[in-house]
Image: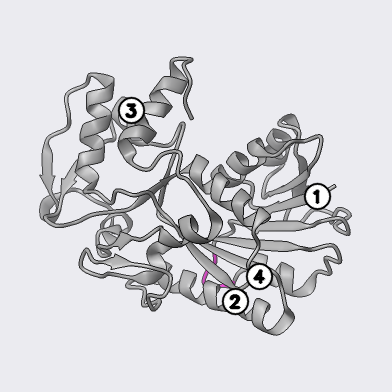
Amino acid sequence: MPHLLALGFGFSAKALAARLDRRAWQVTGTARTEAGCAAMTAAGVDAWLWPGGPMPDLSTVTHVLSSVPPTAEGDAAHAFLHTTPLPSLAWAGLLSTTGVYGDHGGAWVDETTPLVPSGHRGGLRATQNAAWMTLYETRDLPLHIFRLAGIYGPGRSALDRMRDGTARRIVKPGQVFSRIHVADIAETVLQSFARPNPGQAYNLADDLPAPPQDVIAEAARLLGLPKPPDLPFETAPLSPMARSFYADNKRISNARIKAELGVRLRYPDYFRGLAAILAREAGRDGA
């Protein structure tokens, strides 16, 4: 039986686990709190309090997926893989970010684009990418890196921000972002399980990079709510972290996941992605 170990059982790992047949897969996830472990157990996932809890039997782990972000102190998931024997390991993946590419003035980037991050968080991620790739090059770890655009999905989208009153239409002329529905992250990882290619990196983004204010406008339309007024980026009340996201302006190519993994995006643009979330909430067919 294949056995997935999800280091950091967050939004994307949950979506992936939901796609796995539990009669055919064992799934173990990690959490940093007892409450997180309890939630996993309730969902039928073997929970491991990590770091700090006793290590379970990992001898049967065949797949490892990490969504643990690096910090200035290091990368706990990288250290784990570097030091922990996993005799049955056949596939390993890191969920990273397209922030490693930095700013390209709205131009298209692909996986061959040099990693020249523009901020501190992107720099940590680029260092993490390099360190994980070294595990492949020096230890033959069956590693795959997935660089994710902005993630959205049920419970985590512009629809939720419109409802709770936090949605703002920040306008910076020429600015675009790429995004990816969480269901398409799960699909891409599953396709990689079926078509492993260790040492490869993949961009995960939909087909339609777009200004962020346009996504908010579509969410407002779907909900029948007035769209928030335009706020010029220069004077918008943004935290330093929120403002830093606007330092990078690029369009993310997803050609490799289509050509190499055969991925067919369920939600190739935010129009269909948001509509599907709303349909699901209404009990109709949707993501």
Q: Position of residue 265 (x, y in %)?
A: 45, 44
* Element marked by disc 3: helix
Give the distance between the C-alpha atoms of the residues marked 1 and 4, in whole angstroms: 22 Å
Look at mark 2 in the image and give the residue it sits on: 133
Q: Could you tell me the amino acid type at mark 1?
A: Pro
**For discs 1 and 2, the disc positioned in front in the rendered view:** 1
Residue 282 seen from this side: yes
* Residue at the (75%, 49%) spot, across then down: 49
Whether the residues at callouts 3 and 2 have beta carbons within 8 Å, the answer is no
Look at mark 3 in the image and give the residue it sits on: 164
Q: Earlier in the sequence, mark 2 or mark 4?
A: 4
**For discs 3 and 4, the disc positioned in front in the rendered view:** 4
Whether the residues at callouts 2 and 4 have beta carbons within 8 Å, the answer is no
Q: Position of residue 16 (x, y in %)?
A: 62, 43
* Residue at the (60%, 66%) spot, across then down: 144
Look at mark 1 in the image and give the residue it sits on: 2
* Residue at the (73%, 35%) spot, across then down: 38
* Element marked by disc 1: loop
Give the distance between the C-alpha atoms of the residues marked 1 and 2, in whole angstroms: 24 Å
Q: Residues within 10 Å of mark 2 (few under 14, many from 20)?
A: many
Q: Earlier in the sequence, mark 1 or mark 4?
A: 1
Over which residues does the magenta segment extend? 70-74
Find residue 78 and name its label: 4
Above or below residue 75? Residue 8 is: above
Above or below residue 55? Residue 212 is: above
Q: Position of residue 76 (x, y in %)?
A: 65, 66
